[in-house]
Image (cartoon, rainbow, N blue to C red):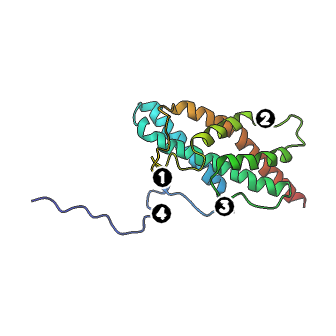
Amino acid sequence: MDPAPVTPDLNPIFAADKDWHCTACLNWTHDPLDLYTVGYKLAADSLVDKVDQTGNDQDALVYPVCFLYRQYIELRLKEIIRSGRQLIDEPGDFPQHHKIQHLWDTAVPILKKAFAHESSPLDLSRSSHVVSEFAKVDPESLAFRYPTDKAGASQLQGIWHINLLRLKDFVNAFADDLDSASTAISVYLGIAGQIS
């Protein structure tokens, strides 16, 4: 006779538990967008590190890794658009879509205005390259979520290999530039808030 199947308890899933070190705290910050942004990148970095250390699962993990990095880039751009507009006294929030090239094209003039007073010009060439590469492959955040589009066509036609460490290096170059810009905008906003 087969043993009875194990039935999980019916307690809430999205709740704290006795393992406090594994319990995340939510809704403790005024604007959690940066935590979302950083979280997607940390998750992707962890998966790439796992593949690098084990040499396993790269063919399956490539999809969530690319999606997570793309989501990180999208959210970082949206955060810069929103906070940058606030800093330069320009009305509006970030665009409510996933078109990464449009987000970049919206963020660049805001960044240039926000950092116009700096002694050295803002170099966005590395970040521009990263966004351009993602825009070619996954312009609206669908290619790494589903194998085919709504018409049934392959999302990643013609792409046969993606080196995850190479991808991580490029995204880190983007992060070096845009995370720093985001932090600087936050600092400027904080100073402006203290002065007014």
Q: Which amino acid, by three-letter code, is at mark 4?
A: Ala
Closer-to-camera residue (175/109): 109
Residue 141 lies left or right of residue 51; in this view the side is right
Q: Earlier in the sequence, mark 4 or mark 2?
A: 4
Amino acid on which disc 2 is placed: Asp
Circle 4 packing at 10 Å, graded few (<14), some (14-19), many (20+), is: few
For marks 3 and 1 on the same chain, the one whose residue lies earlier in the sequence: 3
Give the number of the mark in front: 4 or 3: 3
Q: CA distance from mark 4 to mark 1?
A: 42 Å
How many C-alpha atoms fall within 10 Å of the one at disc 1: few (<14), some, or many (≥20)? few
**Mark 1, residue position:** 151
Percent position (x, y) of residue 150?
A: 48, 54
Residue hosting label 2: 123
The front one of 177 and 143 is 143
* For marks 4 and 3 on the same chain, the one whose residue lies earlier in the sequence: 4
For image coordinates 70% across by 53% down, the residue present is: 79
User: Which numbered disc flags the more N-terminal residue, 2 or 1?
Assistant: 2
Pick the quarter of the image with the C terminus: bottom right
User: What is the C-alpha distance between the residues marked 4 and 2?
Assistant: 44 Å
Question: Contact (CB < 8 A) between labels 2 and 3?
Answer: no
C-alpha gap between disc 4 and disc 3: 18 Å
Closer to the eye: label 2 or 1: 1
Give the residue number, with chain letter if any, for mark 4: 16
Tell me whether circle 2 and circle 1 mark residues in contact (CB < 8 Å): no
On the question of residue 190 being in view, the answer is no
Mark in the foreground, 4 or 1: 1
The first of marks 4 and 1 along the sequence is: 4
- Tell me residue 64's x, y (percent): 49, 45
